[in-house]
Image: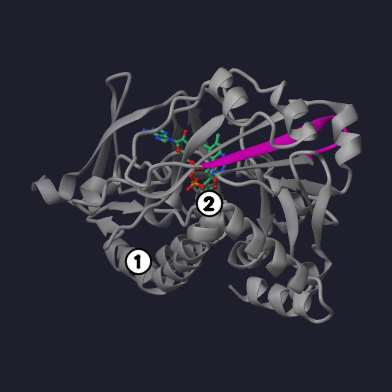
Amino acid sequence: MDVLLLGGGITGLALAHELAPAHDVTVLEAAPGPRGGGYMIDFFGPGFVAAERMGLLEELRSRGHVFEGVRYAAPDGTETGRIDVGPLVAAAGGRYFSILRPEVELGLLAALPASVQLRYGARVEAVRDAGLEGAAGSRRAAVELADGSTLDADLVVACDGVRSAVRELVAPGHGAIVPMGYRVASYLCEDPQLAAELGERMLMTDTVGRVGWAYAADAQRVGVMLAERVDPARTARPVPDRGRLQRAFAGLHPQVDRALAHAPESFYDDLVAQAVAPRWSRGRVVLAGDAAHAPSLLAGQGTSLAIAGAEALARSLRATGPHVEAGLAEYERRWRPTAERVQRAGRRSASFFTPSSRAQLRLQQIARRALSLPGASRLAARSIAAA
Ligand SMILES: Cc1cc2nc3c(=O)[nH]c(=O)nc-3n(C[C@H](O)[C@H](O)[C@H](O)COP(=O)(O)OP(=O)(O)OC[C@H]3O[C@@H](n4cnc5c(N)ncnc54)[C@H](O)[C@@H]3O)c2cc1C
């Protein structure tokens, strides 16, 4: 069958990889080319297992890295604690590494079958499930592009991220994101000297209301992530503004200040949010990845879930052959429990992602110290790896 994938991010590319051997796959991506922005993710859990089955693991692992751990520090630069990643890697049986989001995208692109048609600069404006509108013949779905053209296919998969414009069509009343009270910005910048100083440990600031992370992405580049508490009722996408970012996050730590001086004009900047939909498909239109079940970065598994969900969808479609709608129902039946479990884990971490008061910061410092007691770190690592 012919399949249109709306969005060439992690989900779209992973799904194209899985569907291409058996189907005519076209990926429609609004951006003019592969997106460079993004943050360092922990890659383990369902995505790791799926990537292994998909034959993608070594490509991704070669682009990843295992840090020694995290170093916490106060605004005056003094170290306030450490957490080692060793117990987590051991609890995951070595099936864990860190990787930049853009490297996942580039890894998937490197492994993309030649038969996939990948169209950059192709913004989809509207999606229709033609079958539901009573069109004659077999069920088809159609998309309208910003250039005025229309394409139709046996199946349209919306892989257009947490702010999916298709979710409202599939699950009316659920098009909006579910914000979690945080805003996060991230970018990569060139600073070999700072990268060398940061070394093998990520820096996380021990601060109230706003938190900064800085890490060596490689020998040349530093990755930065900046999180702040915002009104949880707010849903509009923030407009990235370098000046505001530099003012709002100044003074968290001397090394974060140095990285802030390199903030680019354009960077990832969005509310931390989940997507919730009581149904994932309608006729020949189906939601996948963040569009269906974004867990938010609080769950730490958005990209892993995106890859594993894409594989689960492809597997269900393979199993049901020509009975496409049965395949979509099977995908949801099998995959929803895992996606919802990870979303629940994300909601549980929401209250302590960024300390809201000095008392909460103090509690986190005490919990960290307890974690460094013999045995405790192994126990905690086992529960994270099992989440
Ligand atoms: C550039 C970028 C940087 C990111 N950085 C972070 C980060 O720092 N922290 C974080 O928590 N999450 C970040 N994310 C989100 C994270 O990648 C996802 O949560 C996760 O990987 C799931 O991937 P996904 O493919 O489902 O969604 P996404 O990675 O969001 O991909 C969706 C894709 O769909 C495309 N798209 C959207 N609308 C249309 C349309 N109408 N027509 C055609 N294409 C469309 C987008 O351009 C994008 O490439 C980032 C996403 C992007 C695109």
Height in image: 50 above or below 379?
Answer: above
* Residue 101 percent location from the top left of the image: 64, 43
- Quadrant for the C terminus, please: bottom right
Helix, strand or loop at mark 1: helix
Q: In the drawing, does residue 213 fall left or right of residue 116?
A: right
Q: CA distance from mark 1 to mark 2?
A: 45 Å
* Residue 356 percent location from the top left of the image: 53, 51
Height in image: 38 above or below 278?
Answer: above
Residue 217 painted magenta: yes
* Residue 45 percent location from the top left of the image: 63, 67
User: At 8% across and 48% down in the image, what residue appears?
Assistant: 134
Q: Nearer the viewer, residue 76 or 10?
A: 76
State which region is magenta. 216-228
Helix, strand or loop at mark 2: loop
Would you call the spot at circle 1 few (<14 residues within 10 Å), some (14-19), or many (20 or more)?
A: many
| Helix, strand or loop: magenta stretch | strand
Q: In the drawing, does residue 209 fall left or right of residue 250?
A: left
Q: Nearer the viewer, residue 4 or 295?
A: 295
Residue 276 painted magenta: no
Ligand 1 within 8 Å of the CB at mark 1: no
The residue type indicated by label 1 comes to Gly
Q: Nearer the viewer, residue 347 or 14?
A: 347
Badge number at residue 356 = 2
Which residue sits furthest front? Answer: 359
The residue type indicated by label 2 comes to Ser
Q: In the drawing, does residue 116 fall left or right of residue 179?
A: right
Question: Depth-wise, is mark 1 or mark 2 nearer the camera?
Answer: 2
Instruction: Answer with the quarter of the image where residue 57 lies.
Output: bottom right
Residue 253 visible (yes or no) = yes
Q: Nearer the viewer, residue 208 or 9?
A: 208
Q: In the drawing, does residue 316 fall left or right of residue 11?
A: left
**Residue receiving disc 1:** 327
